[in-house]
Image (cartoon, coloured by chain):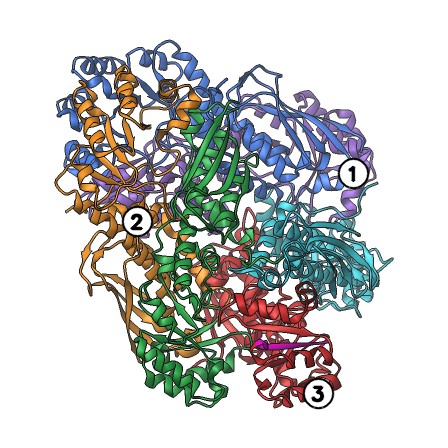
Chain colours: A red, B cyan, C green, D orange, E blue, F purple
Amino acid sequence: MMETLFPLPRLVYEPIVRIALGEDLGLAGDVTSALSLPPEARIDAAIIARQAGRIAGIGPAALAAELVDPAIRFNPVVNDGAAVLAGAEIARVSGPARAVLSAERVMLNFIGQLSGTATLTARFVAAIEGTGARILCTRKTGPGMRALQKHAVRAGGGFNHRMNLADAVLIKDNHAAAAGGVVPALRRAKEQLAHLVAIEVEVDSLTQWAEILALPCELWPHAVMLDNFSVADLRAAVAQRTGTPGAQTIALEASGGVRLETVRQIAETGVDYISVGALTHSAPALDIGLDARPLGG
Amino acid sequence: MMETLFPLPRLVYEPIVRIALGEDLGLAGDVTSALSLPPEARIDAAIIARQAGRIAGIGPAALAAELVDPAIRFNPVVNDGAAVLAGAEIARVSGPARAVLSAERVMLNFIGQLSGTATLTARFVAAIEGTGARILCTRKTGPGMRALQKHAVRAGGGFNHRMNLADAVLIKDNHAAAAGGVVPALRRAKEQLAHLVAIEVEVDSLTQWAEILALPCELWPHAVMLDNFSVADLRAAVAQRTGTPGAQTIALEASGGVRLETVRQIAETGVDYISVGALTHSAPALDIGLDARPLGG
Amino acid sequence: MMETLFPLPRLVYEPIVRIALGEDLGLAGDVTSALSLPPEARIDAAIIARQAGRIAGIGPAALAAELVDPAIRFNPVVNDGAAVLAGAEIARVSGPARAVLSAERVMLNFIGQLSGTATLTARFVAAIEGTGARILCTRKTGPGMRALQKHAVRAGGGFNHRMNLADAVLIKDNHAAAAGGVVPALRRAKEQLAHLVAIEVEVDSLTQWAEILALPCELWPHAVMLDNFSVADLRAAVAQRTGTPGAQTIALEASGGVRLETVRQIAETGVDYISVGALTHSAPALDIGLDARPLGG
Amino acid sequence: MMETLFPLPRLVYEPIVRIALGEDLGLAGDVTSALSLPPEARIDAAIIARQAGRIAGIGPAALAAELVDPAIRFNPVVNDGAAVLAGAEIARVSGPARAVLSAERVMLNFIGQLSGTATLTARFVAAIEGTGARILCTRKTGPGMRALQKHAVRAGGGFNHRMNLADAVLIKDNHAAAAGGVVPALRRAKEQLAHLVAIEVEVDSLTQWAEILALPCELWPHAVMLDNFSVADLRAAVAQRTGTPGAQTIALEASGGVRLETVRQIAETGVDYISVGALTHSAPALDIGLDARPLGG
Amino acid sequence: MMETLFPLPRLVYEPIVRIALGEDLGLAGDVTSALSLPPEARIDAAIIARQAGRIAGIGPAALAAELVDPAIRFNPVVNDGAAVLAGAEIARVSGPARAVLSAERVMLNFIGQLSGTATLTARFVAAIEGTGARILCTRKTGPGMRALQKHAVRAGGGFNHRMNLADAVLIKDNHAAAAGGVVPALRRAKEQLAHLVAIEVEVDSLTQWAEILALPCELWPHAVMLDNFSVADLRAAVAQRTGTPGAQTIALEASGGVRLETVRQIAETGVDYISVGALTHSAPALDIGLDARPLGG
Amino acid sequence: MMETLFPLPRLVYEPIVRIALGEDLGLAGDVTSALSLPPEARIDAAIIARQAGRIAGIGPAALAAELVDPAIRFNPVVNDGAAVLAGAEIARVSGPARAVLSAERVMLNFIGQLSGTATLTARFVAAIEGTGARILCTRKTGPGMRALQKHAVRAGGGFNHRMNLADAVLIKDNHAAAAGGVVPALRRAKEQLAHLVAIEVEVDSLTQWAEILALPCELWPHAVMLDNFSVADLRAAVAQRTGTPGAQTIALEASGGVRLETVRQIAETGVDYISVGALTHSAPALDIGLDARPLGG
């Protein structure tokens, strides 16, 4: 009855879809299709996953089709977030052959690259299944693709860290140093920001974490990022939290060099979140193709 | 005296840099830096390669810094196209601490992701060194990043296939079918396009390639894409060309599923170009960081 | 050493400043100045508060001046957030007379309207001084002016509610009804959103508030909006919270029809936040003028 | 048969509607609706005036609804310019519940703020009924809202002063001083501008007004702004015009500090126009709400 | 001391300059210059008029140079509005050779095409010298070039008709028919528009003109367009005006098929304005070139 | 079965159509139509060629109509590329009278100016009929109109030279000088550009042409521009090519001062292409009008 993945409004990604089409159409459009395809030719095609994976990017692909020609019919077979096998149909696309082939590459680029992120996310999520931890992305996104890549992470079962610099506070060592320590920084943030802005603090050692826990609880941040902690130290950090009454409200996030091979160990330490930059900056694209069946005009 | 990499004008990438900054600054800017850094604090930082690789993206990173605050000084230590070792300085960035840290992520995203493409390209280029073949990218680029990713491929020593649908003709099987065969498609293209638009034809078998060679030479395309040919067939295709007087003017491009492990074999068949979609759609980001040394105000 | 108001990056408001200038310059620019002022004439002017108030909008005004002509010198005398008396200088503006007079209205519109919001905010803030409550704005902002008006509220000593629909959850009665009650809605939000997205629930009665408090604390929202509560009920709501162990972490926000005459009573009930739509949708502009002294060329 | 209010083309306000939606949707859209409303849920709602007033802003509100989701049906009950009582329906809005609630705030912001301007204008217009004078707005408009606010003034029965710096000449004291007096400025304007650009001159005293009237009539401006004149002086200014043959073609505009309490006295002096900056810079928003009735999916 | 041509603000034409550069730079910029010019090479060039004419377009050309590279020095030798002989220098352009040659075509396109309009305008102006009539342009402008072409007309000594549909009323036969005649249309316009919007009426015969003159003078338009009148009829129309007391305030504009060969006859009839669509839609470009002297690096 | 003119995608010209409409609608829209036409009035109109010519611009005109009001029905009677006689209907336009008249000028500007280019092109094409040469345009296009004017040239039967600086190399004397001669420039281009980028070299004398021919054939450019050659020299240049084995693959383009009177002579020399800047920078607009028949509401 209720979707598990919350949708992204089309207005959010319309600008990047227009940019992608503009890049590809240049000043003359798809001259190959224009020259070799009769205007009345129609095509009936399927967007196919050539590998198993998790799908994302159907919204921008559909919009690309519509912007190239409203006469293209783009019918999704699956929704963002679906797990598919190699060979699965993702969507059916039919309409004027010139238009469909002009839109092909942009459609596939959105689905292929966003499904790449969703698929890698899903692998991390699967790797920690049952541990209670959650996979987070970062702000290491492709320029112009922040909203869509964050959505692709959700499609893979992951969660989003802050969307941008404006919607949460993350105090790192540089900030703490400049502010005269973590405490003045926390106090200043709590003084100037209202109830709906969350605050996270990065710590680099168990000692720093202990200092946070030793603060009066009204200064506690909402979350603490344990940066580049060993598995043993992560476990110790969780134990410190357990041993501090009320500290359960502070979310613990493990960060730094997380790989598929190591993520389960990390999750089993009891941290709540594990952030993985690779989900958005290094996910290989999912192999997606368009199988077209040209029809007479 | 002459750069080996031709530069990309700033006007070309200014829009995507503004978009990337807009995404990250949101409606309130970098609240963490604003709250915890004194306005007079200055920072002296270096952008560092944490892995060896080939660098690209210095132009958009420098522009991001300037757009955030013209008081930031961004001094490149190396140029796009440079090979660096792990630990190398890529650029020095100094100025108001708030501004530098606000620009940090966008700067690093451009350099990290474009250097990823340059680095992967350079590995393919190195793998075929001495063979006479060249590595090509495709149109499988990140939305909004076409111009910069094509430039990153050049920075890695690769070459660009067509930039978009408008600047060259590439006749694939669907097109040929709709046009009533390759010959009518070629003829139509030659009739409607002037002397500076190149024409390539995709062939899927040695037979199709032989049919092209059998055409009167005024109908020959400038290039032929040998799609998913085995190494043996590639070799045969090159031999067919050698055996056809005058056919040396037709460039041969191998395409389809090329990997680092197989690329040298392919190059040694004698093809002129080898296109690799992964350069732009699946290159892992190069690991790049900002090492900052905060200074008093 | 540290500013009390965190600054807004210029990139955030540059688009609306360009739009405002474009509206006013039309297709021929300021024909009056162009026709009646010698090109070499210079002007030395001051932006003056004709009423006492709280200042905001200096950033966009300075940018408007610069975009009209980089030869204009715009020197702020006070910063955003300053309280000024009638007659106070806000900034000095000097340069080519044509340029200064062309930019005059746009500069004054930004300062006058944003200072109007800052001034009204400051009056609400003053009215509740010493109570421990904070004044919040809403999303009832002028189209295109969200970021600047939110900043103006901060300049007046107020705090910002969520910046937009994406950065926090606010579950109202319609949402709760559709979700099958507040509890399913809360549970779904906690399942799908990560650690840095805050959740607020609107309640319309003490009974509803009691139901929230009766939930297991891991389902508690970060904040509760007490909508259109009487002063007595607000006091009761605060008491309910006090009587519930651990519930102090739930921020209480009074909302609905708050006026300058009633705000102190509301604040004295012990609520943490009081939101006032009028700050952004109904604040009269502060009366601001440009006193110019023309100089010979 | 003919509308009394001339309509504003949608192309004129589409950019600011897109900006307003972009601000509010952020990078993830309306997460509350997405999480708590089933995708198939529908809503049947009415936009209601909670106060009596004059309506404006239906066009941009309808466009906001359509841009969020073309499946929303937005049916105006009244048109811009309509006077409504408290409780009146302004429009009916039905469609997917998620979409309607996502668009709610932007729709209401446009109608509420523009109706505020229309309502205040209508009060000024009512206050001078029967006098023959007309109420004018100024260029003191919200950034990005020039066209819509000018339209809202018309919806309230007011008239527009010049739309921007390019479409009429208004010679103020600074301009006259720089030009070597009003006469050289007028002459220059008449020499350089063609027949469809009107010219107005600001005067600060009866003496200056007498000097204008003493000019040869081919130098007369189309209008004179009597700035900060007392009511007695306004009356004298009108009498001076009456006593000068042919001077009736010069429109007289009273300007400066006009309030609802004083406007009728001013109008009764016989001036043709009275300009009121507050219509656009200080009108409180009309209280507008959305009464929604959720329906099953 | 005072320029005779009023200047156009740079903000007005910046968008079209950016578009022109974007069109020409494509996705890789000027590959010829990038490949064949050493980065350190400098150029010292002059923009030269290869024909005599009247100059316009220096502002956008200078801006194009600056946007391509702020290191280019663009020094105008003459201003917009200057009459030049064949061979005259218009501007000197020096700087990095790559940048200058990349900007060359866009600079020349602006100056060549706008000077074409200015030159043709100047020929019409010269042809009617001494008659008291003025040459007007129309709205038949190049898309995106309205503001610049209107300015070029002024540079040629011409005057501008209305800038767009919003800033003056022009009642043509279709409008009059729909409104139930010219009188209702005039009355409606005067009722709804304030003192600074001018009204013109098109008439197709002396009879219609007589009907206008027979109206009470408070309904008179500011101008009347005599469309496709013979020279004899134009003379008669002027005589009708002369014979009507007070009608001298109605400007008379001759319109329709005006050519250089016929314009003086038309002007000598005593009309005030003559509008010529060809100034903007059919002016041949002035032949402009860049004479470059390459310098060593 | 197949169109002879390849179409231009609407996404390519949508931005310039929006700009053109924005220029013309200003801040209040078409006040004349709004004031004088009843909202229910409908119009049935035809776009008529008042001169014989070749048509282009139907796409942007139709889009302008749709953007002003989707209720306008725009039905082309002919397609781009059609030759029409004076009086021919180009399209029928019907719908709300206000909307049709508001869109009229922008529709006509696109068709009139682009048909001007198509018509002039067709005259050049006709002048060389039967010679085997082709007419080329240049980059001397109206700012913002590159794609549409290039398309109009195709509509006239001409061919396009390179679309912009990025899609082909054209080595002129300045470039050759800076590169140390044509040979180093050619070599560098061939080294850095892949198989689909064509290279042209400008030569100013038969001697230079001979030097090109004397190069090893792997350095030959794809085309040579014979700049400002006399007819005799053009003939000699063709002969040189004929006398050089294999040189037939080098296209020869005559350039410089080509006029309708001289173009046939030039074509008869045997060159392949003749480029004519005037097609885009100096084509007079085709005279196009809207004949409207107002209907009752």
Of all chains, the one bearing label 2 is F
Quarter that holds the N terminus of chain A: bottom left
Q: Residue at x 34, y 15 (%)?
A: E133
Image position of D169 with respect to C124: above or below: above
Please identify, in this view, whether the residue under mark 1 or under mark 3 is nearer the observer: 3
Q: Secondary structure at mark 2?
A: loop
The tag on residue A235 is 3
Q: Which residue is mark 2?
A: F72
Please identify, in this view, whether the residue under mark 3 or under mark 2 is nearer the observer: 3
Type of residue at label 3? Answer: Arg
Do marks 3 and 2 share a subunit? no
Do marks 1 and 3 share a subunit? no
Q: Residue at x 43, y 30 (%)?
A: F285
Q: Which residues are magenta?
A: A219-228
Q: Which residue is mark 1?
A: E38
Quarter that holds the C terminus of chain A: bottom left
Camera-side residue of F31 and F204: F31
Please identify, in this view, whether the residue under mark 2 or under mark 1 is nearer the observer: 1
Image position of C204 with respect to A235: above or below: above
The tag on residue D61 is none
Q: Secondary structure at mark 3?
A: helix
Give percent across and percent down for residue F233. 70, 22
Type of residue at label 2? Answer: Ile
Image quadrant where residue C135 sits:
bottom left
Image position of C222 with respect to B71: above or below: below
Q: Secondary structure at mark 1?
A: loop
